[in-house]
Image (spheres, rainbow, N blue to C red):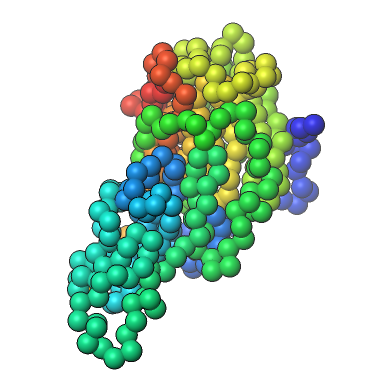
Amino acid sequence: MTTFLKTTDAYKQGARTLPGRYYTTPEILSEEAERIFRRQWICVGRAEAIAGAGDYVVAEIAGESIIVLRDQTGERRAFYNVCRHRGTRLCEATHGRLSETIQCPYHAWTYALDGRLIGAPHMNEVAGFDKKEYPLHRVALAEWEGFLFVNLARDAEPLAEAFAPLVDRFARYNLAQLRTVRRIDYEVRANWKLILQNYNECLHCPTIHPELSTKLPYTSGANDLIEGPFLGGYMEIKAPNESATLTGRACGLPLGDLPDADRRRAFYYALFPTMMLSLHPDYAVFYTVWIRRRRRGTTSEMPRSSGTAPTDRTGTSASRASWASARGCISRGPTRRARVFPRRGTGSICG
Ligand code: FES
Ligand SMILES: [Fe+2]
């Protein structure tokens, strides 16, 4: 049976906001890159983005560029976006479709989509050179509920183990079958941790998003997931509203065969370190945070968004400043189209 806890019930005595330097110093960010972003499973988007042979996306994680692609046999793979000859960037675009190979733009070393080096001009004249010894460096890749994750660690913990608290938790929402209908990118001048912290509390909702509070009373929620790097729970959708939309009406069919209780709840989960997942009866939104270091002369990074969808649940300018990235309103549509909290130019369409 699911146990929901109020924040005050789960609160650990002594818990405090991190000291300011954790939000502002480049040294802390570098340490986070080593100890968090190079070791955790990082969401790089939806599996549908590489649906066809040769489709690829490029993700920047902890200063590394990673190619995630589907090869000719249909297998999905991830590699460092770095030529084994002299380190040239192989794919400059953020996404696209490759032919049957990846060719380095510098000296034309050529790789099969499974990472094998299959062409290296003039290297046959070099005694002892063996192409088999120079495949692209692989990166661990796994799928969960239609989302793709990569892990830069050489000894990456299997995703199934890392995500054990999430297994089948959201099966009723059919997330793997959903399709992305809109993406919105935001640039946020704030430390990446603030975005997740803001996501996981709604005490600011009455002041920052008063219209949201009419649909989702800010004290109505409770957490059912506080294990490992995951945190989240539900908020009640106040009747007669059906969803977290501007009108309060549902913008699509139910995402799955949802029990009555779930048709009156919105669920919000943070999947540390960079993903957030919002589940409503009729649509889902996911957010991914992509970190950019600030230009010289500044001291903190700039999270960047890439996304779709009702990123913030209200879309006010104040809240927008607190959100980094949205990548996808996924919906079962097509049904009615509805605007979701579209204020001051934000918000999105789903359905
Ligand atoms: S650096 Fe790629 S072929 Fe030389
Ligand atoms: Fe907010």
Name the spot of residue 164 as percent of width and height, x first: 68, 48
Which residue lies at the image location 78% right of the left edge and 48% below the top edge?
A: 13
Total count of labels = 0
Instruction: Give the left or right position of residue 202, taking residue 42 as reference.
Output: right
Most distant residue in the front direction: 73
Relative to residue 151, is residue 231 depicted above or below?
Answer: above
Quarter residue 351 falls in: top left
Judging depth in this view, the residue of 351 and 318 nearest the camera is: 351
* Residue 314 seen by the camera: no
Which residue lies at the image location 26% right of the left edge and 67% below the top edge?
A: 110
Most distant residue in the top direction: 240
Quarter holding the N terminus is top right
Relative to residue 177, is residue 39 depicted above or below?
Answer: below
Relative to residue 158, is residue 120 depicted above or below?
Answer: below
Judging depth in this view, the residue of 14 and 166 nearest the camera is: 166
Judging depth in this view, the residue of 237 and 343 nearest the camera is: 237
Most distant residue in the bottom direction: 127
